[in-house]
Image (cartoon, helix red, strand yellow):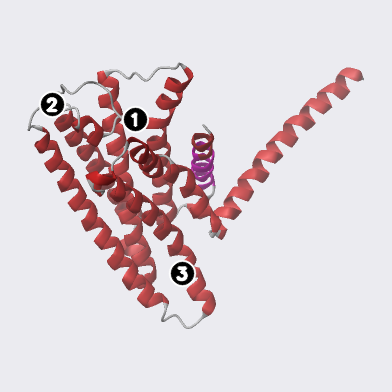
């Protein structure tokens, strides 16, 4: 519950700050807004149902509820990875091709990239859900996990048809590795350019733009790859649960903190938002006081 509330608060504040501050209406913050929306969706797909089961002392989820959870989780996770890849490209253009930044990262181009990320995630989620739930299950109905995760569902299959979904997972992992290579190459070129910047202030500003994104990508990829590529000998219910929490629950709560820690513009926007909220409260309180004075008179 604490992690879920932290994710809701952190991502909600970032979304509100970006939407309300016109200075943050830039490509970088547009993609950050998309990332926060995806983080909210991801953590809301798994955690509330798990908390409800804990409170009601039950471990049940309906078949179609499980299918819906699989679809939304993989749809959002895949979209998030695509958005992180696009954000790496945005940073590359901003630092390596600053004179062409306005042309390459125009509003229309940003909307198209975001739409492509969401569409590819939707198709990926649909593919995995259709493949997984077309497989006959006959090894019981117990998943050693706090949400419906495909590797755990495949353990319940009773035929070799699970190899079809296993193949789809392998294809997704290969595409993910391709995105990872693209991100790494982008940052190699970024750091090459940054280290040539003569002024220390310029290098610091460039690093402050890139380090948060690199930290988020590293956390996301390392935990997800360990969850899906770890050898069977390391598999155990407790370890699987811990790893799933690390890649499905912790990043949505930590990402807002990472992005706001070294970002002066976002910090200023959050302070401005706080002052605006405080001002609204003061005005409301002042109105009530004036009304009370008029009644007394």
Q: Quadrant of the C terminus?
A: top right
**Which callout, 2 or 3, points at the residue further toward the start of the chain?**
2
Using the image as rendered, state which of residue 238 and residue 52 is in the foreground. 238
Disc 3: which residue: 206
Q: Position of residue 293 (x, y in %)?
A: 88, 24
**Which callout, 3 or 1, points at the residue further toward the start of the chain?**
1
Highlighted magenta segment, given as a residue range: 7-20
Label 1 environment density (alpha carbons within 10 Å; few <14, some 14–19, many ≥20): many
- Secondary structure mostly seen in magenta is helix
Residue visible at 45% across and 25% down?
51
Mark 1 element type: loop
Residue visible at 37% across and 40% down?
248
Marker disc for residue 147:
1
Q: Position of residue 172 (x, y in %)?
A: 19, 46
Q: Disc 3 or disc 1, which is closer to the eye?
A: 1
Disc 2: which residue: 134
Label 3 environment density (alpha carbons within 10 Å; few <14, some 14–19, many ≥20): many
């Amino acid at each position: 519950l604490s992690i879920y509330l932290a994710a809701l608060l952190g991502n909600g504040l970032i979304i509100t700050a970006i939407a309300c501050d016109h200075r943050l209406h830039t490509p970088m913050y547009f993609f950050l807004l998309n990332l926060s929306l995806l983080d909210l969706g991801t953590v809301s797909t798994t955690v509330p149902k798990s908390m409800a089961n804990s409170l009601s002392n039950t471990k049940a989820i309906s078949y179609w509820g499980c299918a819906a959870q699989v679809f939304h989780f993989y749809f959002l996770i895949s979209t998030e990875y695509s958005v992180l890849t696009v954000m790496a490209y945005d940073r590359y253009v901003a630092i390596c091709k600053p004179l062409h930044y306005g042309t390459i990262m125009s509003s229309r181009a940003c909307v198209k990239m975001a739409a492509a990320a969401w569409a590819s995630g939707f198709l990926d989620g649909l593919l995995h859900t259709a493949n997984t739930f077309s497989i006959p299950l006959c090894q019981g109905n117990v998943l050693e996990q706090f949400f419906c995760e495909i590797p755990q569902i495949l353990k319940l299959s009773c035929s070799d048809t699970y190899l079809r979904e296993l193949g789809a997972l392998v294809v997704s992992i290969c595409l993910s590795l391709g995105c990872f290579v693209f991100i790494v190459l982008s940052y190699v070129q970024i750091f090459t350019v940054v280290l040539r910047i003569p002024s220390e202030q310029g290098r610091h500003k460039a690093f402050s733009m890139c380090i948060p994104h690199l930290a988020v990508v590293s956390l996301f990829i390392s935990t997800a790859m360990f969850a899906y590529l770890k050898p069977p000998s390391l598999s155990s219910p407790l370890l699987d649960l811990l790893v799933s929490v690390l890649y499905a629950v912790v990043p949505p709560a930590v990402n807002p903190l990472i992005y706001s820690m070294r970002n002066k513009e976002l910090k200023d926007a959050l302070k401005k938002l706080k002052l605006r909220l405080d001002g609204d409260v003061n005005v409301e309180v002042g109105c009530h006081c004036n009304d009370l004075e008029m009644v007394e008179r």
